[in-house]
């Protein structure tokens, strides 16, 4: 995850992204941040980290809705 906070001084702005992300699809989210409320800034950072973690872990989810556990088979030691 990469985070950059900036104050734009004109309509169009540019920012640098890490070289390892070149050629990859990335998502850019832009929203106003109030520095007057430090707790809201910390909450925003936590939400961004959680979103990045969820995106990373979602690719490893398994659908276990059809899984049937057979206790007798699991305890059969023969």
Image: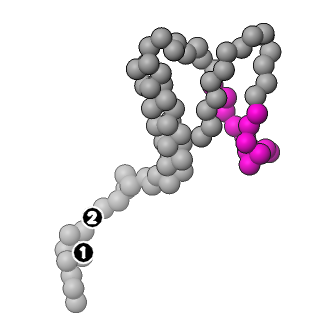
| Residue 25 belongs to magenta span | yes
> Where's the N terminus, which quadrant?
top right
Please tell me whether residue 68 is drawn above or below residue 31 in the rendered image: below
Horizontal and vertical percent for residue 36? 48, 11
For the residues labelled 2 and 1, the Cα–Cα distance comes to 8 Å
Quickly name the residue at label 2.
Answer: 69
CB under 8 Å between discs 2 and 1: yes
Sooner in the amino-acid sequence: mark 2 or mark 1: 2
Horizontal and vertical percent for residue 48? 51, 32
Residue at the image point whose x is 69% and y is 37% from the top: 26
Instruction: Name the element at disc 1.
Output: helix
Please tell me whether residue 68 is drawn above or below residue 43 in the rendered image: below
Q: Which residues are magenta?
A: 16-29
Residue at the image point whose x is 54% and y is 47% from the top: 56
Q: Looking at the image, which is closer to me, 8 or 44?
A: 8
Residue at the image point whose x is 40% and y is 20% from the top: 39
User: Is 76 displayed left or right of 58 in the figure?
Assistant: left
């Amino acid at each position: 995850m990469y985070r950059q906070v900036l104050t734009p001084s004109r309509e169009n702005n540019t920012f640098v992204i890490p070289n390892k992300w070149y050629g990859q699809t990335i998502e850019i989210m832009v929203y106003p941040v109030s520095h007057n409320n430090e707790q809201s800034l910390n909450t925003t950072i936590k939400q961004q980290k959680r979103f990045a973690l969820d995106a990373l872990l979602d690719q490893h989810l398994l659908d276990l809705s059809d899984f049937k556990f057979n206790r007798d088979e699991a305890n059969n030691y023969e």
